[in-house]
Image (spheres, rainbow, N blue to C red):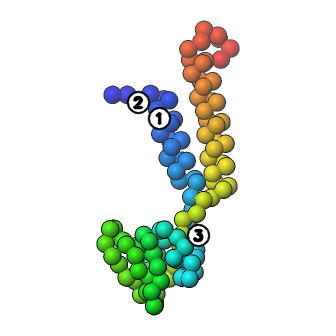
Amino acid sequence: MRRSPVMSALLVALLVFTVGCHSWSTIEPGEVASHDLVRVTLRDDGEQAINEPRVVGDSIEGEHERKATTIPLEEVTKIESRSTNVAGTILVVAGSALGGLILIAMIQCATSDNLAC
């Protein structure tokens, strides 16, 4: 089964759109509770995504892979939250619009009898 060029372009645009709109920003432990999701980098270079995080004493608590987890702050080297990347979003929207216009022009030329295309 062959995928149409339009469907392929839409899939690529969707992939780029989801990646381009968000980025991870470093935050302090005191800011953890104001975020629904944080990414924690550990001393051993491992990472964990923690849902509903909160700092309790000297640890970060929350859910990782649907299980309650507690990570001592002394094991944490970096805490990040996901935020909207405005510049990335603008570039993705502009690039998608330009790509869409090019795709429309290509389809019109392919279905036209006009030799100037």
Report which quarter residue 105 is drawn in.
Answer: top right
Residue 63 badge: none
| Residue at the limit of the structure toward the left, as seen here | 67
Is residue 49 visible in this depiction of the protein? no
Q: Position of residue 34 (x, y in %)?
A: 54, 73
**Residue behind mark 2:** 3
Residue 8 badge: 1
Which image quarter holds the N terminus?
A: top left
Report the front residue among 11 and 113: 11
Mark 3 → mark 1, Cα distance in angstroms: 32 Å
Which image quarter holds the C terminus?
A: top right
Mark 2 → mark 3, Cα distance in angstroms: 37 Å
The residue mark sitting in front, 2 or 3, is 3
Report which quarter residue 82 is drawn in.
Answer: bottom right
Q: Is residue 116 above or below residue 62?
A: above
**Residue behind mark 3:** 25
Question: Mark 1 or mark 3, which is nearer the start of the sequence?
Answer: 1
Badges 2 and 1: C-beta atoms under 8 Å apart?
Answer: yes
Amino acid carrying label 2: it is Arg
Mark 2 Cα shell of 10 Å, populated few (<14), some (14-19), many (≥20): few
Q: Position of residue 23 (x, y in %)?
A: 57, 62
Q: Residue at x 57, y 53 (%)?
A: 20
Q: Residue at x 35, y 78 (%)?
A: 69
Mark 2 → mark 1, Cα distance in angstroms: 7 Å
Label 1: state its secondary structure.
helix
Question: Mark 3 or mark 2, which is nearer the start of the sequence?
Answer: 2
Report which quarter residue 29 is drawn in.
Answer: bottom right
